[in-house]
Image (cartoon, rainbow, N blue to C red):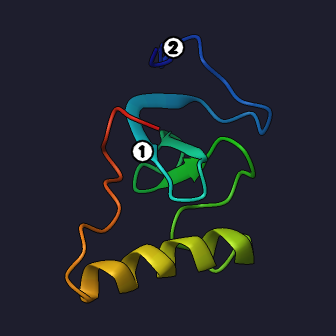
Amino acid sequence: MKPNPVQSENQFGLAWGMDVMRLPCHGTAYFDEQSGISYRCADCGAVVGSIGMPQVCQAEAQKWQLQKALGGTGWDYWSEEI
């Protein structure tokens, strides 16, 4: 179920939009309405793809990027499946 952008606010005080991104680290990121340009992880609060992402999350994303480079499927960030 996707959050209502008017009523939904996370523990970091950020209002979430309707776009949901599934992350390789099993986190969920929502469009950050305050920034207007990025997705922010609901678990750790980091901007997806930023230097502020935890190392474990960056390593998991790199693993999937390498798999795609080697001919695999890679990670589907917009999948409804977790």
Q: Which residue is mark 2?
A: 6
In depth, the one of 43 and 74 nearer the eye is: 74
> Residue 16, position in %: x, y?
53, 31
Q: Which SS class for mark 1? A: strand
Mark 2, mark 1: which one is toward the viewer? 1
> Residue 36, position in %: x, y?
42, 48
The amino acid on which the numbered mark 1 sits, given as a three-letter code, is Met
Residue at the location (64% across, 68% down)? Answer: 57
Tell me if residue 71 comes above or below residue 20 in the rendering.
Answer: below
Residue at the location (44% across, 30% down)? Answer: 17
Answer with left or right where residue 36 lies relative to residue 53.
left
- Image marks 2 and 1: residues in contact by CB distance under 8 Å: no
Residue at the location (40% across, 56% down)? Answer: 37
Answer with the quarter of the image where residue 25 lies: bottom right
Q: Residue furthest right?
A: 11
Tell me if residue 52 comes above or below residue 46 in the rendering.
Answer: below
What's the CA distance linking mark 2 and mark 1?
A: 19 Å
Among numbered discs 2 and 1, the one appearing first in the sequence: 2
Q: Residue furthest left?
A: 71
In depth, the one of 3 and 75 nearer the eye is: 75
> Residue 38, position in %: x, y?
45, 56
Q: Which residue is mark 1?
A: 21
